[in-house]
Amino acid sequence: MKWVPGRPEIDPLSGQVQTPANRFGGISLADQSALEVGLQLGTRRSLDVVAITVGGTRCEQSLRDALAAGARRAIRIDAAGPLSSAETARVLALSLDHASIIVCGDYSFDRGSGSVPAFLAAELGISQALGVVSLTAQVHDLLVTRRLDGGRREHLRIGDRAVISVEGSVAQLRRATLANTLAIRNNEIEVISPPLTIERPVSTSKPFRPRPRTLAMPHGNSTLERLNSITNVATTSTRGEQIELDPQESAAYILQTLTHWGYIE
Amino acid sequence: MLAIVPVRQGVIPAGFGETVSECDGRVLLIGEGCRDAAAQVKGIAREITIVEAGTFAPAAWARFLAIQLGGEDIIIFPASPDGRDLAPRLAFELGRSLYAGAIRVTTQRVDLARWGGQSIESLQPEPRLVATLQIGARDVVSSSSVGDVIELEYVTDLTTSDPTFISTTQPDTTSVDLAEAPRIVTGGAGIASADILAKLAAVAEALGASLGATRVVTDRGWVDHVRQIGTTGVVVAPKLYIACGVSGAVQHTSGIGQPEHIISINTDPSCPMMHLADLTVVGDVNEIIVELESLLTVTAGAK
Amino acid sequence: MTAETDSFDAIVVGAGPAGSCAALSLAKAGKRVVLIERGPFPGSKNMYGGVVYPRILDSLIDQWWIDMPVQRWVTRRTTMLLTDTQAFSVDFRTAAWGQIPYNGATTYRPDFDNWLAKKAEAAGAVVICETTVTGLLRNSAGAVCGVTTDRAEGDLQAHVVVACDGVNSFLAKQAGLYTHDDASHFTLGAKETLSLPKEVIDERFGVRGLDGVDIEILGGTGGVSGGGFLYTNYDTIGVGVVLKLTQLAAQKQRPEQLIAALKSHPAIAPLVEGATLKEYSAHLIPEAGAAMMPTFVADGLLVAGDAAAMCLAAGIWLEGVNFAMASGMYAAEAIVEALAHGDTSAKGLAGYLKRLESTFVLQDHRKLRRAPQLVLSDRVQHMYPHLVANIAERMFRVDNPLPKPGLRTIFSEERKRLGLRTRDLLRDAYDGFRSFG
Ligand SMILES: Cc1cc2nc3c(=O)[nH]c(=O)nc-3n(C[C@H](O)[C@H](O)[C@H](O)COP(=O)(O)OP(=O)(O)OC[C@H]3O[C@@H](n4cnc5c(N)ncnc54)[C@H](O)[C@@H]3O)c2cc1C
Ligand SMILES: Cc1cc2nc3c(=O)[nH]c(=O)nc-3n(C[C@H](O)[C@H](O)[C@H](O)COP(=O)(O)OP(=O)(O)OC[C@H]3O[C@@H](n4cnc5c(N)ncnc54)[C@H](O)[C@@H]3O)c2cc1C
Ligand SMILES: Nc1ncnc2c1ncn2[C@@H]1O[C@H](COP(=O)(O)O)[C@@H](O)[C@H]1O
């Protein structure tokens, strides 16, 4: 592995494209945002930005795009099959022990658990700030704001090496210039093939359906009353009404329904 | 099975009830203000352990918990922001597999939500594991028997590294208006452009409603991220909820409360959001928004 | 600023069939060529009816059928005349079209165009996507010498530019190659892709394996002049209409309403029953053929494919992809010639026109030049389907105890009933014979 002199800044992109419809796939908006944040930090601090991804040859287009947008190097860690988050982070960490700041996206397209960045921080034994919605780079520190639940926010200061994961809205990935796009097209993407464990869990996939819920004991003295109260037959619920009309008729129907429900006069 | 719930300033995160119920009432609270928090979980938890550990420090807490909890086979966190941060670090410390974004965890089977909640993957778990449970994935069971509250003493491991905590802020006013709004109109990925979203905002205003969005839309940068509704966004409680081009992923629907009336406009009649709605409108939401806007401006003009 | 990293022999704008064949052919000749496409990948935004006739690729891609993305090979072709309640069909099938060297295939454009562009890339062309060409660069002598794009540092220079940017070509217009710009020269094509299980398609259309059906339809588009089509893919079918733009606008009809009407026609409904809508799309078609073609070359510029109105849309024929591929290839050959002589002026590129004229590209258009007008005429659209269908209905109806009438009697009675003048009939027959015969 050849390292450029200086402290590289590393930006893991997810390039996982093993999906059903994935000619349209690529990297998540969060990962695009991560790349942009990385590029901006790189400019501000005069650091080299490296784009790195674990995946098959199909993610090379994303890496090329990253180079065209301004990343200094692009590394693909070769993995033919799906890896667990922990394994992904383990192999990423092998190439990242020089990185000062690692910017990840807050979710990848498929797994979307946002756990790779935390595993990565654990592997490297450095701090983490995940789900970042805004950040400011100061001379030495990074000030970041994380999203908590219920609309709350946490404000943190990051001094040394850290993994941060950013939301898609933090930054919009710049458009590469045509000159760059042409210039990088013959650049090599560095490929590393460390030994790794491909995940082969026995699993089945099916469309999402919510878990059944236990209903509260229905009101009513008789069985019939209880049944009615569960099924709502006495009330005039319209739950489940479906329409398929012209746009104009649909709009009119929606307003009519809202009027019927008493939301508009 | 043990639920671990991170606590901030005595506030427990969304999804703690589901997690505690999944673990049959056994919970460990860790963070700041756990004693206050313990009082809040009493109706649900029957066995409570608390660790007063100060402000959120995932690396240090994970190290501490790993030492304490080696004997617990199944550890589940709520998939709240803090839970999702802490779970992988603990899994790492314990050298176990992480099952992230689960909607069901049993010793026999784990169901995971994938592809933004569009599909479920079922697998047979390893015997010892760490998982995060989706908020709203199940119902909360109340428990009448309450045992003692046990307190564990927290010791920081100085070799770990966490960011420096500055402060936590409460929701800003722009999202409060959403949290308390009685009527909400939400735009999802079915919205084709920022222009259409602007039209939707106008429609919302004409209906006296606030505008919300799914993560896909906030990520596109079309509205501010404070308008994101769901697990990681704001949790809202409107009476009327109009979902426009929203598929109804768990992470989103867990944040919409229990509206009295739901309208869902979508091209796909079988997506989860349509199952929840009182009125489902099958069609191109972009065209319908344009029509709604013109109908509403015509009526407004006539008044 | 100009991208100085490379200088190119040629820039091809638009990675449709025309552009990819031009780039492939240039790259194979060892020329430095860049292919610029505005979509996220070649073919991403492209739509059409559904059948490609790829034989022109014989000289460009060895054994193209081996890896070309094919849905089905067309082995059955039906031409249907529809009135509101009747259908008259001519049905032809041959096993020959299901074997090498094949005839036509149904394929999805995003797959096909992407495949073709990949071939160009493999031959050495540089393919740049998500980049829109916004204008032409000219040198001091006024010759085209490159393009501007919507990216920063996005000017690009080359000896020749090939405009393959599709119907209504912005580049050809900017270069002043179109002298007319008239809505009556366009038709609008609109199509629905419907899902059906493969076995159901096999059964309904009477085909097996990868064999498929191409149905061209005359009539059935209500009051708007036009036609329809129905093609089978592997597990979807494409149903669409091609409509005269001016009438569509005048009658305030929406193309999707007309597709819906076509789908509910008694002859079509059983074929599409129970299918679910996957996709709807619409696109302009240069319909007037030879009558609207622009000048094909200027100094440093060639126009190919739909950009040069080379789509053949003449009633029962709807072919554009093969014309686009051929013209792209011929443009490339002319460029190679011109570069060898060091003359890329209009004169130096004249080999392009020669090739077009000596091959099917312009010969078919010449031959069929009256066809579009004829096919879209009121008589063909609104009277002949009735005439033919009524005659057929009476021929095959058993009106016992009445005896069977003679064909001549039926014909003249039906002609009179529809108010058709013999003179017009004869003229149309003559035109038709000259065009199609
Ligand atoms: C840990 C975690 C936390 C998350 N937190 C949140 C959160 O807080 N809030 C949130 O919203 N999401 C959250 N998500 C993301 C969530 O999983 C979904 O990806 C997201 O909610 C999907 O948004 P959507 O419905 O807009 O998009 P999609 O799922 O892409 O759905 C778009 C819908 O629009 C329909 N559509 C498309 N075109 C049209 C048209 N022309 N007319 C009508 N309908 C159309 C489609 O049929 C589809 O149903 C989170 C995910 C994870 C993993
Ligand atoms: C409804 C319908 C049905 C049809 N059915 C058939 C059929 O069954 N069989 C058949 O053979 N033909 C059919 N055709 C005709 C056929 O689609 C066209 O003739 C053919 O696609 C022309 O190819 P092209 O390469 O010239 O142009 P296109 O396929 O239109 O490609 C033009 C390319 O240029 C790109 N582009 C445009 N402007 C720019 C720019 N400024 N910068 C960069 N890129 C640009 C576009 O994105 C596109 O990729 C049909 C057409 C329609 C509309
Ligand atoms: N295979 C991978 N290669 C590089 N980075 C990855 C990979 N998988 C996940 N990541 C990073 O981790 C983030 C969260 O991913 P996930 O945990 O899969 O939701 C992504 O946004 C990426 O930045």
Image: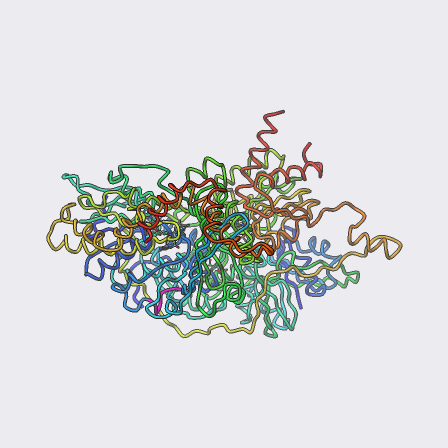
Name the image quarter holding residue B177: top right
Counting from the top left corner in percent of width and height, residue B77 is at 61, 61
Counting from the top left corner in percent of width and height, residue B284 is at 54, 46
Residue B266 visible somewhere in the drawing: yes
- Nearer to us in this view, B140 or C105: C105
- Nearer to us in this view, C110 or B206: C110
Quadrant that contains the N terminus of chain A:
bottom left
Q: In the displayed image of the protein, which residue is found farthest to the left?
A: C341
Name the image quarter holding residue B52: bottom right
Name the image quarter holding residue A211: bottom right
Q: Is residue C306 left or right of residue B31?
A: left
First to last magenta residue range: C65-70
Q: Is residue C168 left or right of residue B197?
A: left
Q: Is residue C239 left or right of residue C99?
A: right
Q: How is the image coloured?
A: rainbow
Counting from the top left corner in percent of width and height, residue A241 is at 68, 48
User: Which residue is painted at 31% across and 42% down in the image?
Assistant: C170
Residue A171 visible somewhere in the drawing: no
- Nearer to us in this view, C207 or C383: C383
Q: Is C68 placed above or below A250 here?
A: below
